[in-house]
Amino acid sequence: MKNQWHRQLRREASAHHMCAENRSALENISDKGEAVALYKKTIDWALEEGYPCMETLRSDFSGCEAYGIFVDKVFHGERLDDQQVYVFHNCSGTIRTGLNVQKRIIPMLYFANGCNMYVRCISETAPKVRVPLYVFGPNRVNAEIECVTHKFDVK
């Protein structure tokens, strides 16, 4: 039997007209880690559509920080450079990011649902790279690093 969070994601996916391929993938997930991987794979569509809703994110995915999903979190200069994609929902505070030389990663940062964040460089001596910031809807994101900001409206 599937968990309630899984049924809720499927209901919301149908309501937001998720494509058949990703609905099929959603049907076959077995845990929240797989759900987050699918979410991050379709992140542009998901944030534009408001999928899943904030209530679902808060109730079922607030504990997914290890997967790079943050909900209602206040940051205090944490370093985020270990994953390719980080997603922030209604977060505030300061993060540090940039090139992870060992993993060869430049994180992509996604902001939605009223974030108020500052993005700083990992360190003064870190290699200078452009970090992509994707901002969906009304958020305040100030970057003290070289970045490329992409702003999107939400439905």
Image (cartoon, rainbow, N blue to C red):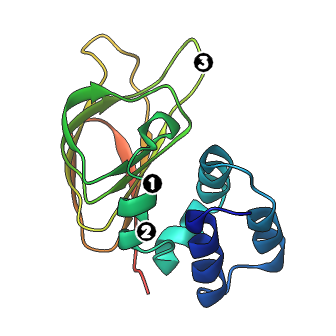
Q: Is residue 116 left or right of residue 83?
A: left
Q: Hey, which quadrant is residue 152 in on the image?
A: bottom left
Whether the residues at callouts 2 and 1 have beta carbons within 8 Å, the answer is: yes
Q: Which residue is mark 1?
A: 61
User: Label 2 vs label 1: CA separation?
Assistant: 7 Å
Quarter of the view holding residue 72: bottom left
The one of 140 and 15 positioned closer to us in this rendering: 15
What amino acid does circle 2 point to? Thr
Q: Nearer the viewer, residue 47 or 147?
A: 47
Q: Look at label 1 and name its amino acid.
A: Phe
- Disc nearer the start of the sequence (2/1): 2
- Between residue 107 and residue 36, name the one nearer to us: 36
Does residue 113 lie above or below 70 as drawn?
A: below
Instruction: Name the residue furthest front.
Output: 1
* Earlier sequence position, callout 2 versus callout 3: 2
**The C terminus lies in which quarter of the figure?**
bottom left
Circle 2: is it few (<14), some (14-19), or many (20+) Cα within 10 Å? some
Whichever of callouts 1 and 3 sits on the residue coming sooner in the sequence is 1
- Mark 1–mark 3 contact, CB under 8 Å? no
Q: At numbered mark 3, what does the secondary structure look like: helix, strand or loop?
A: loop
Check residue 103 in the rendering and tell me which mark sits there, or answer none: 3
In the picture of the structure, the residue carrying the numbered disc 2 is: 56
The answer to whether 54 appears left or right of 34 in the picture is: left
Q: Are marks 2 and 3 in contact (CB under 8 Å)?
A: no
Q: What residue do we see at 73% from left, 65% from top?
A: 26
Judging from the image, what secondary structure is the residue with disc 1 in?
loop
Disc count in the image? 3
